[in-house]
């Protein structure tokens, strides 16, 4: 694949899976447009990529807000000639159980975990269509979108919705040569990991150990391992792969 001719938009690129995906794609030769709620984090990452010889731009936006999605897509469209790859990686841990969850909490979860992917795709598609050569859209869903979450039904709801979106857009966009897939990570050692157990960062090792006991491979994933799967789905090696919800979970969904 001629990566040097490709442009990738990575949402939630400031840390964790998004950051490692940006590093993997830029390392392969793609130009990357980095979006995050934390503008400082993507500006620093863009600087690191450029200093390493890559091409990157940084963009700050709250992707739970449609007007900010539209603004940042227009901003990116003024910086790059087209988009070939969209990595929609926005997500957040959600409250546990069902009792006591407020409508505001429900709406925040849907806005961040689900609405962001739908409307970011809508906003970026015109940039992807500029070349007429198709493209690749990749959503970060979750193993919790494939099987029930033992902590948060609300999180499972939103991540299962992304899988439904993946399958539907696969059919809708296939005539244009645009492939749509989802990665479904199991537990990953990112800054969010402890939050899935409603704990602070000081408990990340404890939470990783707990999750490891539920994974056949006996450990949580590193963000770079999920990024490697995203790089595969973005490239020509997966040219006949679309509509897939790919578990990258150490066997978590197999038991």
Image: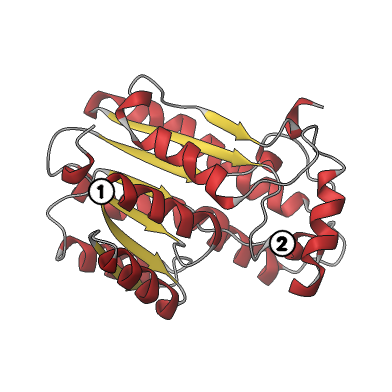
Q: Which mark is residue 30?
A: 1
User: Which color scheme is applied?
Assistant: secondary structure
- Residue 122 circle label: none
Which residue is pictured at 18% across the width and 42% down the height? 129
- Left or right, 54 with respect to 151, comes to left
Disc 2, SS:
loop
Count of marks overlaid on the render: 2
Query: In terms of image quadrants, where is residue 164?
Result: top right
| Foreground residue among 48 and 248 | 48
Query: Which quadrant of the rendered structure holds the N terminus?
Result: top left
Q: Residues within 10 Å of mark 2 (few under 14, many from 20)?
A: many
Mark 1 or mark 2, whichever is nearer to me: 1
The vertical placement of 212 against 64, above or below, is: above
Question: Which quadrant is the C terminus positioned in?
Answer: top right
Picture coordinates of residue 143 (x, y %)?
Answer: 68, 39
Quickly name the residue at label 2. Answer: 94
The residue lying furthest to the top in this view is: 240
Q: Residue at x 67, y 47 (%)?
A: 157
The numbered mark, 1 or 2, whose residue comes first in the sequence reads: 1
Give 16 or 142, whichever is nearer the viewer: 16
Using the numbered discs, state the Cα–Cα distance from disc 1 to disc 2 in whole angstroms.
33 Å
Residue 95 seen from this side: no
């Amino acid at each position: 694949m001629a990566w040097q001719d490709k442009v990738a938009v990575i949402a939630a690129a400031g840390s964790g899976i998004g950051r490692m995906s940006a590093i993997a794609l830029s390392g392969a030769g793609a130009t990357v447009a980095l979006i995050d709620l934390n503008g400082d984090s993507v500006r620093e990452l863009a600087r690191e990529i450029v200093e390493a010889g890559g091409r990157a731009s940084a963009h700050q936006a709250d992707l739970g807000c449609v007007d900010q999605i539209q603004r940042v897509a227009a901003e990116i469209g003024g910086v790059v000639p087209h988009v070939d790859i969209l990595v929609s990686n926005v997500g957040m841990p959600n409250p546990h159980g069902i009792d006591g969850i407020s409508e505001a909490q429900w709406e925040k979860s849907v806005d961040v975990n689900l609405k962001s992917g739908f409307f970011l795709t809508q906003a970026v598609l015109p940039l992807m269509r500029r070349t007429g050569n198709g493209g690749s859209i990749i959503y970060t869903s979750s193993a919790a979108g494939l099987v029930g979450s033992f902590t948060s039904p609300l999180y499972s709801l939103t991540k299962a919705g992304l899988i439904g979106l993946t399958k539907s857009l696969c059919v809708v966009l296939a005539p244009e040569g645009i492939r749509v897939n989802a990665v479904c990570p199991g537990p990953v050692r990112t800054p969010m990991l402890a939050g899935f157990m409603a704990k602070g960062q000081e408990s990340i090792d404890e939470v990783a150990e707990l999750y490891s006991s539920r994974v056949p491979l006996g450990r949580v994933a590193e963000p770079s391992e999920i990024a490697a799967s995203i790089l595969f789905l973005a490239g020509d090696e997966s040219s006949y792969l679309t509509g897939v919800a790919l578990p990258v979970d150490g066997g978590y969904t197999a038991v």
